[in-house]
Amino acid sequence: MRVRILGIESSCDDTAAAVAEDDIILSNITATQDIHASFGGVVPELASRAHQQNIIPVIHAALQKANIGKNQLSAVAFTRGPGLLGSLLVGTSFSKAFAMGLNIPLIETDHLQAHILAHFIRNTDRSNPVPQFPFLCLTVSGGHTQIVIVKDYFDMHIIGQTIDDAAGETFDKAAKIMGLPYPGGPVIDNLADEGNPDRFVFSKPNIPGLDFSFSGLKTSILYFLRDRLKEDEHFIENNKADLCASIQETILDILLSRLEKAASQSGIREIAIAGGVSANSGLRSKLYALKHKKKWNVYIPPLAYTTDNAAMIAIAGYFKFLRQDFSNQSAAPYARSRF
Ligand code: KG4
Ligand code: ZN
């Protein structure tokens, strides 16, 4: 019998629902909250209110697109954390009520594990290769930057992480400093395309091990621009593409130098990337280059599964369903990473 999972994601500013039939996605709907753009970042209270408005229409659309009635669902999977508590509460409460009403199992998923498990979503003809265990995953999002050894679906170990800002946050803050809209990652990515990545040099962290740090880079961008703007008030405008390309290059260098180190230390050549920043075209092409240079098997998610989505929650729910790993009505959201 087929397993049909409704996945619900509400950890930050995207309200999303998806339906998986076994490991294939039938529908994947996301309502992005534009309301935050004018504030230059996510406003938690506005996010939870928007989730409340969006959640029922988004779930309705996901079921309709999948052509699945709610009585055909095997279970409801939701993001329990990490994320904004007010946002998580909306998805968590809805999922509990929906599962109880339908009398089907409730499955909690970890947002960061789900970003990684998105690699196990299959094409309809199951032709896409999936990572072999153990593999390394560089998870790069707005809130997290981690290198994870994935030994099995739910046996994951963080071997490196940021000690301050996340990679996506660094893109967003750099964009804000330059007066570019939120979220800054995709905007910098686009502008960087036309720019010279070697034009400006920014500071890179010098910390041992596999951890990351981005706060020094942010300060270095801020001071550099402050000084240049004193000499030329149009400096940012006139050098936008080169600035974006150079900033992106620095962030990617920091990320990939650590990833290469993790691969050589662990001897693992199955390498994946996940999270919103894995949509970055520069990161994707540099990883392809490393694939050939280092003889890695590289796994880059389709764009739809990079930034927050519910397909990844549905697939994580599917693997938990196979293990009969169910949650109960007392599961409360958690804000910080737990695995
Ligand atoms: O995974 P995600 O959607 O949400 C979190 O779990 O945080 O990641 C959002 C982050 C934002 O910081 C956004 O600027 C960044 O991913 N991002 C990108 C790109 N697309 C999204 N960063 C760089 N290049 C992109 N193309
Ligand atoms: Zn995310």
Image: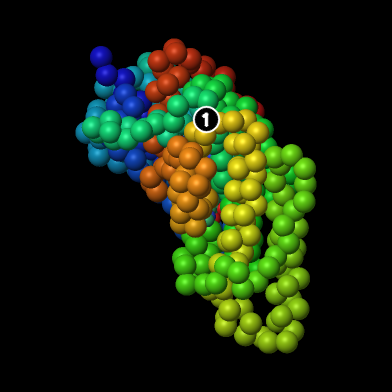
Q: Is residue 253 above or below residue 188?
A: above
Q: Nearer the viewer, residue 146 or 322?
A: 146
Side of 286 where 205 appears, left or right: right
Q: Position of residue 215 (x, y in %)?
A: 73, 55
Quadrant hosting residue 158? top right
Point out the image quarter for the C terminus: top right
Judge whether residue 297 can be spotted in this image: yes
Q: Badge 1: how crowded within 10 Å, few (<14), some, or many (20+)?
A: many
Identified at 58% across, 79% down, the residue is 239
Taking the view exactly as shown, the residue that stands out farthest to the top is 324
Side of 259 where 100 appears, left or right: left
Q: Nearer the viewer, residue 240 or 21?
A: 240
Badge 1 residue CB within 8 Å of ligand 1: no
Q: Is residue 41 above or below residue 327?
A: below
Q: Nearer the viewer, residue 123 or 169?
A: 123
Q: Is residue 256 above or below residue 174?
A: above
Q: Secondary structure at mark 1?
A: strand
Q: Amino acid at mark 1?
A: Phe
Question: Which residue position holds label 1?
Answer: 135
Side of 301 where 170 appears, left or right: right
Q: Position of residue 318 (x, y in %)?
A: 39, 23
Point out the image quarter for the N terminus: top left
Identified at 52% across, 17% down, the residue is 328
Q: Position of residue 34 (x, y in %)?
A: 47, 58
Judge whether residue 244 can be spotted in this image: no
Q: Position of residue 278 (x, y in %)?
A: 49, 48
